[in-house]
Amino acid sequence: MEVKKADSTGIKSMYADVIEGLSKSRKELPSKYFYDERGSELFEEICNLEEYYITRTELEIMKENISDISEILGKKLMFIEYGSGSSEKIKIILDQVKGINVYVPIDISCRHLAKSAAQIASEYNHLEVIPVCADYSKPFEIPEPKSEIKHRIVYFPGSTIGNFHPQDARVFLEKIVKVAGENGGLLIGVDLKKNKTILDKAYNDARGVTAEFNLNQLMHINRELGSNFNLDKFKHKAFYNEEKGRVEMHLESLDDQRVKLNGKVFDFSRGERIWTESSYKYSLKEFEQLAQSAGFRVRKVWTDEKELFSVQYLECFL
Ligand SMILES: C[S@@+](CC[C@H](N)C(=O)[O-])C[C@H]1O[C@@H](n2cnc3c(N)ncnc32)[C@H](O)[C@@H]1O
């Protein structure tokens, strides 16, 4: 299956992002570089971990409320999924919501996307599937479908919105308002604020899969950009920062060390960290305010009994 590829997924962009991040006084790397093929596989493993309540809870909410969700969505739909990964969650929707004519999965992990999109196309024969490999934080074209479309629905599950700092989340949601357009909407998974113990466990699983996922980013950068990060000299560190309402994931240097990248050198002191990901958690009120500030109206919110997670349908007011 042909995958449309945006320029922003190339080595040049990655090089610029990595140099910029490592040159900051507080070093950081964008979380999108977790996702090479191995990173996508590791993320799938994370989704099945006992400690990682997120995927399990979101799936439960979707399954329990799918008739309600289906009624709200309408017919002649184009579903545009940002960060589609293994395209597992969309299957619950495709099985129940009969009005979907077009599915556009968008992901930065091109090979993984090609496999997942081909699988969806083979399982749902009636569906026009147009995979787009793009970095959704940069400009890219949404393809024009052949099928007739009345509404565009953007699907953004997994609480990936939490990976944006709140001010960037607002800018991103403003872009989504434009993509969905008049009569369009956003079906989004949003992780909720909760007890620190549950969160600390979720990002520090006993088997160390999340640690491997975090370190895999350095392997990805070594392979693509020819740097010489020594994976044995960094350790995974993740914790819930209650004051900021976010889980922070870092890689901590175990020694004083120097890393080379295309003629540039980056020095790390023992204990110094690279900030690799934030996962903001919201209260329902906080997320409603964020959505409204971007041009969305919250139409409906579904949660689990313990209010660990929410699935929300937002309508654009243009
Ligand atoms: C947290 S995972 C969620 C996967 C899936 N949507 C789910 O709910 O289980 C984030 C997904 O978004 C993709 N991704 C992360 N940053 C991206 C970016 N800037 N542009 C495109 N895809 C991105 C990753 O490759 C990955 O598949």
Image (tube, rainbow, N blue to C red):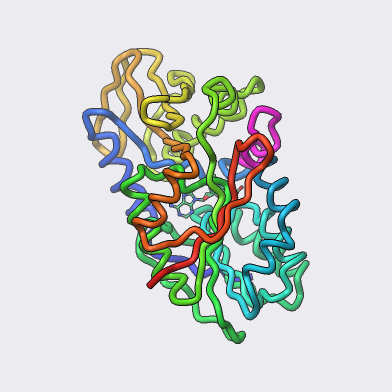
| Residue at the spot 37% in from the left edge and 63% down from the top edge | 295
Q: Is residue 293 left or right of residue 315?
A: left
Query: Height in image: 243 above or below 106?
Result: above
Q: Nearer the viewer, residue 105 or 241?
A: 241
Would you say the magenta stretch is mainly helix, strand or loop?
Answer: helix
Residue 292 is covered by the magenta coloring:
no
Query: Which residue appears at 59% of the width and 28% of the height?
Result: 202
Spot occupied by residue 237 in the image (x, y as percentages of width and height)? 46, 21
Q: Quadrant of the N terminus?
A: bottom right
Is residue 142 in sight in this rendering?
A: yes
Task: Indicate yes or no whether the magenta region holds residue 48.
Answer: yes
- Residue 211 in sight: no
State the quadrant of the C terminus. bottom left
Q: Is residue 193 above or below residue 133?
A: above
Number of residue marks = 0
x, y percent for residue 306: 65, 34
Viewed as shown, does residue 254 lie left or right of 259? right
Q: Is residue 306 left or right of residue 20?
A: right
Q: x and y percent of residue 143 in the render?
A: 49, 76
Task: Report x, y in % for residue 302.
Answer: 63, 50
On the image, which quarter does residue 9 sit in?
bottom left
Which of the 4 image quarters holds residue 111?
Answer: bottom right
**Highlighted magenta segment, given as a residue range:** 42-55
